[in-house]
Image (cartoon, helix red, strand yellow):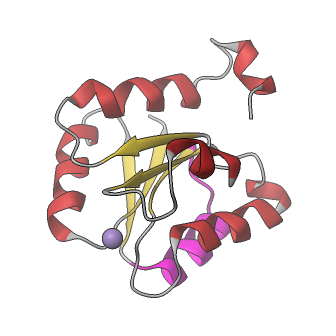
Amino acid sequence: MKTVAIVEDNPDNLLLLRVLLQEHYQLREYTDGTAAVSGIIANPPHLVLMDISLPDICGVDILEKIREQESTAHLPVIAITAHAMLGDKEKILALGFNFYISKPIVEPSQLLAPIARLINPDRRPQLQTEA
Ligand code: MN
């Protein structure tokens, strides 16, 4: 079973993500940025779901730290955020996220489809050349 790290400080959002994903993936949960940076770099998952608004380090800065490390430089990271605090989807993708999902998640496939697509690049070789 592939491992997905969830970085999310809101208990309700975390619960929803856990319920939707736990039967498909082994989950590691981080509720603040400091724990996420150290945990993800020390023990890289197959994919990260990243809230942007966190109590200590914002998701964009966490992504930057992940990308600086050779072992996690190419890790798929999906931004999940409630509102466009950073602007639009294109801006978030330009920051280096592999995909963007807006909250609230109303349909499980909104979450499951992009995770499956990014976590199995061998099935979709063309993804390796996408930003
Ligand atoms: Mn948050």
Q: Which residue is at 31% across, 29% downward?
A: 110
The verdict on residue 21 being magenta is no
| Nearer to the camera, 106 or 91 | 91
The verdict on residue 44 being magenta is yes
The kind of secondary structure the magenta stretch mainly shows is helix
| Nearer to the camera, 22 or 96 | 96
Q: Residue furthest right?
A: 70
Q: Residue furthest bottom?
A: 56
Above or below residue 128? Residue 126 is above
Q: Position of residue 26 (x, y in %)?
A: 38, 45
Q: Position of residue 27 (x, y in %)?
A: 37, 52
Part of the protein shown in magenta: 32-46
| Nearer to the camera, 49 or 52 | 52
Position of the C terminus, as image quadrant, is top right
Above or below residue 11? Residue 130 is above
Q: Which residue is at 42% across, 79% downward?
A: 32
Q: Which residue is at 52% across, 75% downward?
A: 58
- Relative to residue 87, is residue 68 drawn left or right? right
Q: Quadrant of residue 12?
A: bottom left
Above or below residue 76? Residue 86 is below
- Relative to residue 85, is residue 17 drawn left or right? left
